[in-house]
Image (cartoon, coloured by chain):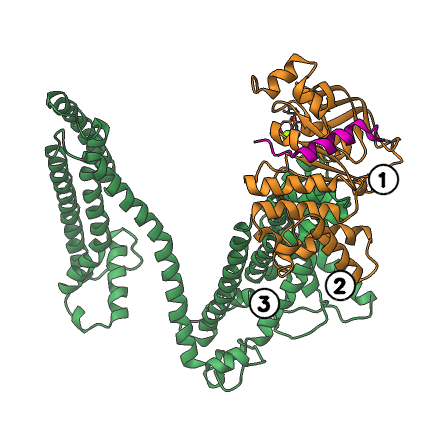
Chain colours: A orange, B green
Amino acid sequence: MNMLTDAAVEQKLHSTSNEAAIKMRGKDVTVHYNGKQALFGVNLDVPEQQVTALIGPSGCGKSTFLRSLNRMNDTIEGCRVGGEITLDGDDVYDPRIDVVELRARVGMVFQKPNPFPKSIYENVAYGPRIHGIARNKSELDQIVESSLEKAALWSEVKDRLNEPGTGLSGGQQQRLCIARAIAVSPEVILMDEPCSALDPIATAKVEELIDELRENYTIVIVTHSMQQAARVSQRTAMFHLGYLVEEGATDKMFTNPDDKRTQDYITGRFG
Amino acid sequence: MAGYLIGFLVLAAGLAALTSMQRARRSRDAAADKAHSRPIYHGLNAAIWTGVPAFVFLIVWLMGQNSIINSLVLASFPGADALSGAEKSLLISEIRQVAAGNIFKEPTPEILAAVDHLKSLQSIAVWMMVAVVAAAASIGAFFGYRVIESRFRARHSVERSVTWFMMFSSLVAILTTGGIVASLLYEALQFFARVPVTEFLFGLRWEPQIALRPDQVAGLGAFGMVPVLFGTFAISALAMAVSVPVGILSAVYLTEYAGERFRAVVKPLLEILAGIPTVVYGFFAVLTVAPIVRSLGLSLGLEAAPNSALAAGGVMGVMLIPFISSLSDDAFAAVPRAMRDGSYALGATKGETIRKVLLPAALPGIVGGVLLALSRAVGETMIVVMAAGLIARMTVNPFEAVTTVTVQIVTLLIGDSEFDNPKTLAAFALGLVLFLITLGLNLIALRTVRKYREKY
Ligand SMILES: Nc1ncnc2c1ncn2[C@@H]1O[C@H](COP(=O)(O)OP(=O)(O)OP(=O)(O)O)[C@@H](O)[C@H]1O
Ligand SMILES: [Mg+2]
């Protein structure tokens, strides 16, 4: 099931060999839930305009790390984040940082598609509206259209923008959520198992989309599918029991990992 | 006697159950093939057969006994045939009073004879009742015991009986409601035979007291319910004006902002508020709120009555706060966390998330709660009886007293006027109107709430 064409492999090799700028950086990141430690000193760099995949067995802290990147952990009661996480060199947990602004710059797509019970148009327009991005209606229309366009959904929904977003199929809903995240022009997009609720065709579409989005955005994706990680990411980070086991270029991780646990996990010998 | 009989029936049923279980066990052990039901079901089945038919007999007997005895006594009373219905019931109650030993004046010999007759009939009836019930129980026990054999489907039989019993229980509530509505309708129709419906529905004057004199019954338009209904809606509107914003905002605060500890203290407090008897709210309205409201009204240069719509409506609003707040709370809690996360992840603030995502998503549930609260406000009686006025008046000044449908029903029914007086009957007509209004509100509310439940 290797969907990588030769050209894609070459491009990937090219992009990873290029020393990219660091967009986000985690230094000694620890997370406690109600006193119980879930992440232990994670050091991970997220390079700009690349796809970083987080893999590892269930409960190892992938989502926890992802959520601490845009401070979604703040909404969980009893969750405490330690260490340092920077975005373009600025500490995102600095009290002077406006979390609202941070989340506008670091968007997120969830495991289960969660469109608001509003129309498709309103779903995409939600972010631009609250941030006052569009100056008038036609600008907003423009943003909605281009976001849906970028999310590869425009042709499917352009005639039904006023129908509820919850009426779309699961795959369409997920692409709607991606469009919604794109609409506020984030710099980083975090995706937590975005394809786990989708069928193979919808998954292929979303993967294709992720590959395109890489041109303009920095992407961090959590996935349980090794093939998916191999297909869409340039860098891969392997988590286990709250520790970052190893990270590196995806090609190397999947062909010649340093750590035995990574090897075992990738080849499916433990879960 | 009936009490002993019921005790006896319970005992008999228990006994039947025990012996039947024994028999079932024996037949199970003796049978070659697998028994259909466990012995406990055979026992239950026998108990049902023993107890239930006899119990039904007993109830029917107790309900019929008195009227049969009464007619037998009257039939043998000299000259009773010539009496009218009311006189007959007077006579019978006198005989029964004497029989019970409550002698107010020296009874006549005819009455004494009737008393003897009554007593003998009663003792016969008691023994017959015992005999019939015992017979029913024995026959039931006999058949319940005899059917036992390993292939008898006692489990199904018990299951069926239980189903019947449940159906009966659910019918009780429905039949009672039906009966209430029917009697309400009947009395209301009597009222409309005396006062035209149109006058009742559209009349602008409500002065039921004058109508005591027969020459003033209709015609004068003293039974126009519009001002009374106006009062009900005025007070309800005031109550909603207090309870809806406060209730919803407190629900928002509790679900979205308050810390765990604050919530743990305040939520039970709200429940306590919901448990305060309305009489106590009534005291509060009359003794504390009304004087304050009055002096406020006077200081504003408005006419202010000691009892005001504002005092009653305001206190009623306080009463409804926990109601609305807890229903809104449920509605907010039912909005999935994913909705909030989706909004926060787009960089929305808490306020924006609440206004743009939570409120719209929870709105149907909130509307349902508000409508239920409104229906309670319309039907609320005690607070308004104590704190609203008696005189029907249409005024927009909330410092003046108005009256409500419930207050009028209470005042119309208190007093010693006869039951076929339009003044008394008007209470039933008002009750019918009130019933229809609250029924409508509840139906709409339940429908919106249900629709909203299906959404996620
Ligand atoms: N809200 C929470 N409250 C308490 N503990 C939590 C919470 N969320 C996660 N945890 C704990 O933190 C650890 C890491 O969880 P996390 O959700 O990050 O795992 P994950 O790698 O995303 O797993 P999965 O692949 O199953 O999604 C787990 O032990 C989990 O029980
Ligand atoms: Mg996860």
Q: Amino acid at mark 1?
A: Asp
Q: Amino acid at mark 3?
A: Thr
Q: In front of the other: label 3 or label 1?
A: 1
Disc 2 is placed on an element classified as helix
Query: How far separated are the C-alphas under marks 2 and 1?
Result: 50 Å
Q: Amino acid at mark 2?
A: Arg
Which of disc 2 and disc 3 is earlier in sequence?
A: 2
Identity of the residue drawn at 19% across and 31% down: B42
* Residue B315 in view, yes or no: no
Q: Residues within 10 Å of mark 2 (few under 14, many from 20)?
A: many
Q: Is residue B36 above or below residue B255?
A: above
Say which quadrant the N terminus of chain A sits in: top right
Pointer 2: what residue?
B294
Pointer 3: what residue?
B404
Q: Position of residue A238 (x, y in %)?
A: 68, 22
Disc 3 is placed on an element classified as loop
Q: Residue A5: within the magenta?
A: yes
Residue B146 bears which disc, if any? Answer: none
Parent chain of label 3: B
